[in-house]
Amino acid sequence: MIADHELDAWRERWNSVAEAPAEFQRKVQRRIKRQDQRFVLGNLLTVIAFLGILIFAVFMRQQSSWMGTGWATGICVLVFVSVGYRVWVLRGTWRPETQSTRAFVELWHRRVKARIRLLRISIYVSLGWIIFCAALTAANWTTIGQDVRAHPRDWVEVLVACVLMQPVIWFWAARLRRRKLAELNEVKTILDELDEKSVL
Amino acid sequence: MSESRRALEEQFDRILGDYGAAISRLAYSYEAVAGIREELVQEIALAIWQALARFRGECSERTFVFRIAHNRGLSHVWRRRPPYRLLEELEESDQPVDPRPHPEEQAARTDQRVRLMSAIQSLPVTYRQMIVLMLEGLSHAEIAEVMGVTENNVAVRLTRARKALKDALGVRP
């Protein structure tokens, strides 16, 4: 066997680098406990939010105006379609096929691409939501009542708030998209580095 | 607590005991700042815990640990932009203390260690991974398993990674 003195010297220096941090295991156990609690709490909040939306929809449907029914139905459709689309777009990105670096980076690549698609769609959805709200308000304009028309309140107020929120949503989405595109470039670079052909 | 959960916890504790120092060393190659590095070490341990339930022994435990650790390290490199500081930029308090006497010898060792770590941190991530796995004593087959590439690929890349490391260390051929 040929001695590799250079490697031996590097290994000696490398092995003197670090020890496990103090109380390492205890800190990790604490984090695991916190993570378990967060998992339970997260699921609980999701169930509460889902039930809340259903109760809201039922409550609004009992109201006589078309407006209430329209809003409730709109919100329910928006939530179900958004969640459904998200699940569909993120399919195949839950876990890597193996734990290897290549599988992890490929999964990372798929995830970033899916999130960029989601961001693009979310801009259209927010626009669609405003058009829906505006159409609903226009269609129910006669039933809203003189007082609201005279002093914009309730539904009109919400509509104005939705419109005013648009620049914030677009700015946020554009910022996130830029970051995701940069991440995509980074992942592509790592994938290229791992590419079998690149060693030839 | 169920029997399977207890067995999993025992296995996890043993893995942390066996590979804790290796995980810390590996974290050095991804993060130079002591406080953040400790966070990274904990994140790696957490990721190992999450993956452990699905580990069916399809590879060795060592390969499994290094796979998870490097994947977490890669994510960390992305999240920590602008890139990490090099070790030369660190404060003295970030450096591990060598308890041995002979100040000159200690200083020389520390200097060599710092130079090696700085050089490793300056490499592209895939080279960095290769070098770290090689320094941890993994065979070409194990490195190939960790990275998901062929052994031939590992051999070629290791040669290049070593050359890049020597260049970064300022070693003349």
Image (spheres, rainbow, N blue to C red):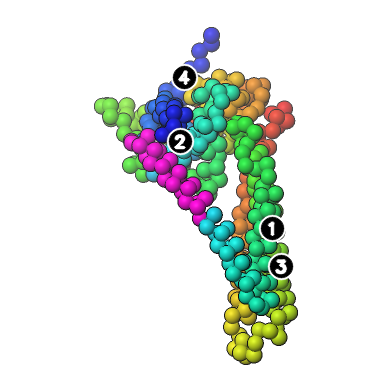
Look at the image and tell me whether residue B82 can be seen.
Answer: no
Q: Chain of mark 1?
A: A
Q: Residue B162 falls in which quadrant of the image?
A: top right
Callout 2 amino acid: Ala
Compared with residue A88, is residue A27 higher up or lower down, i.e. above or below? Answer: above
Q: What distance separates the C-alpha of mark 1 from that of mark 3?
A: 13 Å
Q: Chain of mark 2?
A: B
Q: Is residue A23 magenta?
A: yes
Q: Nearer the viewer, residue B127 or A188?
A: A188
Crowding at dot 2, Cα within 10 Å, few <14 / some 14-19 / many 20+, comes out as many
Q: Nearer the viewer, residue B161 or B66?
A: B66
Q: Which residue is mark 1?
A: A81
Residue A8 tag number: 4
Left or right: A192 as drawn, with respect to A29: right
Q: What is the secondary structure assignment of the residue under circle 3?
A: helix
Q: Residue furthest left?
A: B101
